[in-house]
């Protein structure tokens, strides 16, 4: 029985190694469901030096951004300002450079006087930090349930066809990068995409093509809902809060 147990343990160890080594493949086509791009888990947190991303990759904060860092640190209590400033200073580095090479993370650690690992653990945890180079316009399309029910699949296909790239890819001119993401919190305005800091909502295929054309020409497409509504109110019009708000003091006793 001991030999049998050893064989079972050996077989289980082999299966675990195979699962870890191979990306998970889900047979979504048989069920007619859309699946996000499969990525190995080590891509999320492992850094490997390359010719364009290594500790020697040039990165220095501009004089203006060094001043901004001091302003950021001043928002936090003394003794905690360096650690508390990690996220906004990483964001500042990304906005200056377009993405976060390992050299930029090391520079953030230097200017904040914290161990580099404190920077790495934050940069690898939050998906808004791009540790690989992205295009000038980073298109993040939501394909989770509310957007999927509102036909985000057609918006995704429009982007892929229009730009000639797949999810995770960039155009040859470095102008666009396409990423598929989880919920962006604009479910009532589905389908939608986030491009850099801007939301484009209530999209149709024609809307998406017009947005891409405008950006490619250096223009600024209209942000927010594209179907005529102002924000997230019902498409058919307001059903509550239809009157102007009451002024200060409404309902307060006159003798108070």
Image (spheres, rainbow, N blue to C red):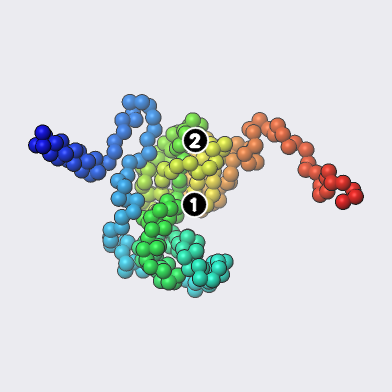
The image quadrant that residue 162 belongs to is top left
Q: Position of residue 149 (x, y in %)?
A: 49, 30
Q: Position of residue 8 (x, y in %)?
A: 15, 36
Q: Is 213 on the left or on the right of 177, as rendered?
A: right
In terms of secondary structure, where does tag 2 sit? helix
**Quarter of the image containing the N terminus?**
top left
Q: Which residue is more in the foreground, 14 or 216? A: 14
Res. 210 visible in picture: no
Quote the CA–CA distance across marks 1 and 2. Answer: 19 Å
Mark 1: few/some/many CA within 10 Å (<14, 14-19, 20+): few
At horizontal 49% and vertical 35% (from top left) the residue drawn is 147
Q: Is 56 on the left or on the right of 72, as rendered?
A: left
Q: Position of residue 226 (x, y in %)?
A: 58, 39
Find residue 196 and name its label: 1
Q: Is 200 on the left or on the right of 177, as rendered?
A: right
Name the residue tied to disc 2: 147
In terms of secondary structure, where does tag 1 sit? loop
At horizontal 42% and vertical 36% (from top left) the residue drawn is 157
Find residue 252 and name its label: none
Mark 2: few/some/many CA within 10 Å (<14, 14-19, 20+): many
């Amino acid at each position: 029985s001991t030999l049998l147990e050893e064989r079972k343990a050996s077989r289980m160890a082999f299966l675990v190694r195979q699962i870890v080594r191979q990306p998970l493949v889900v047979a979504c086509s048989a069920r007619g469901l859309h699946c996000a791009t499969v990525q190995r888990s080590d891509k999320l947190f492992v850094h490997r030096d390359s010719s364009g991303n290594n500790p020697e990759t040039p990165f220095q904060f501009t004089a203006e951004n060094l001043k901004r860092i001091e302003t950021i640190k001043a928002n936090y209590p003394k003794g905690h300002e360096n650690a508390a400033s990690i996220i906004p200073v990483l964001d500042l580095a990304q906005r200056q450079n377009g993405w976060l090479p390992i050299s930029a993370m090391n520079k953030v650690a230097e200017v904040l006087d914290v161990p580099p690992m404190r920077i790495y653990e934050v940069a690898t945890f939050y998906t808004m930090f791009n540790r690989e180079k992205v295009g000038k316009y980073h298109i993040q399309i939501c394909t989770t349930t509310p957007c999927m029910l509102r036909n985000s699949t057609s918006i995704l296909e429009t982007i892929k066809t229009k730009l000639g790239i797949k999810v995770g890819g960039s155009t040859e001119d470095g102008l666009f990068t396409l990423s598929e993401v989880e919920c962006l919190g604009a479910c009532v305005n589905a389908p939608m995409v986030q491009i850099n800091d801007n939301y484009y909502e209530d999209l149709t295929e024609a809307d998406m093509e017009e947005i891409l054309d405008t950006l490619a020409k250096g223009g600024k497409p209209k942000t927010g809902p594209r179907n005529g509504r102002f924000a997230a109110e019902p498409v058919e019009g307001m059903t509550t809060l239809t009157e102007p708000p009451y002024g200060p003091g409404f309902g307060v006793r006159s003798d108070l």
